[in-house]
Image (tube, rainbow, N blue to C red):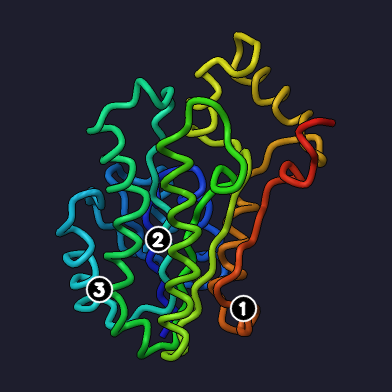
Amino acid sequence: MKRVVLITGAAGGIGSATAKVFANEDWHVVGVDKRQPDDPQKVAHFIRADISEADTPAQIIAEVSAQEGRLDALVNNAAVQICKPLLETTIDEWDLTIASNVRPAFLFVREAFPLLKKSGGAIVNVSSVHAIATSIGLSAYAASKGALLALTRAMALELGRDSIRVNVVLPGAVDTEMLSAGLKRGVMQGDKEEDLIRTLGTRHVMGRVGHPEEIGRAILFLADNEQASFMTGQTLIVDGGATAKLSTE
């Protein structure tokens, strides 16, 4: 039987690209999102759900257990981004960010543990470079991604005894709807979206922003027990060199 991967946020920019990368490598993809993927052919089993609701992860894992009967990799990718100054962020917005970006990773891992233990599976959490170097107006998002980074290390320590690997990917600026929405908060000058993205790209060592498929391939690498068999508790930064450069230069 094909290896089975569960990807949350499968309709978003990185999530949909990751689903395609796994499907092209002959994985059976289970995708979870609040909206239908643009390319559903790459998702063999789509589950429409809101993972910010506390009961949802258990329901999803029960469905995967009943229909697929196995799980070889879990990709905690779904996220929301609140673009507001800290002092203007409401309690509801803060709670939604944590409930969407951090709590589901905990709940999915807790519920999926029996399946992952049986397969000797892998967990890949998708954090962000904002976990280590952030921008004005992204306090809630940065806090949630920093929490996910720390949670990855803790998971790796506790699950290693059961041969479950846990690693985290930190994407930098990637050409997605979330990036476009974030640029509208006014930290860069420009009227057209493509001009803002192009300007942002020039600030990178690679001279461009990333493509969603590039993050998807990094996630696949960490999920594959042959390619990354001796990696756990590690952080893979995929940011075009953005965090390698001093801000003072």
Decide: few, some or many residues near mark 2? Use Cα within 10 Å; few <14, some 14-19, many ≥20.
many
Say which of marks 2 and 1 sits in front.
1
- Local secondary structure at mark 3: helix
CA distance for labels 2 and 3: 15 Å
Inter-mark Cα distance, 2 to 1: 20 Å
Residue visible at 75% across and 35% down in the picture = 208
Badge 1 local density, few (<14 within 10 Å), some, or many (20+)?
some
Q: Quadrant of the N terminus?
A: bottom left
Q: Amino acid at mark 2?
A: Ile
Q: Earlier in the sequence, mark 1 or mark 3?
A: 3
| On-image quarter of the C terminus | top right
Q: Residue at x 66, y 55 (%)?
A: 237
> Callout 3 environment at 10 Å: few (<14), some (14 to 19), or many (20+)?
some
Q: Nearer the viewer, mark 2 or mark 3?
A: 3
Residue that badge 1 annotates = 231
Amino acid carrying label 3: it is Glu
The image position of residue 10, as x and y in percent, is 40, 52
Q: Residue reaching furthest right? A: 249
**Disc ID at residue 151:** none
Q: Is residue 87 left or right of residue 226?
A: left
Foreground of the two, 66 or 152: 152
Label 2 vs 3, first from the N-terminus: 2
**Marks 2,1: beta carbons within 8 A:** no
What type is the residue that disc 1 sits on? Met
CA distance for labels 1 and 3: 23 Å
Q: Which residue is mark 3?
A: 111
Q: Is residue 67 left or right of residue 22?
A: left
Tag shown at residue 7: 2
In the image, residue 179 lies at what x, y percent?
Answer: 54, 32
Residue 205 place in picture, x, y as percent: 82, 40
Q: Position of residue 142 (x, y in %)?
A: 48, 41
Q: Residue at x 60, y 53 (%)?
A: 215
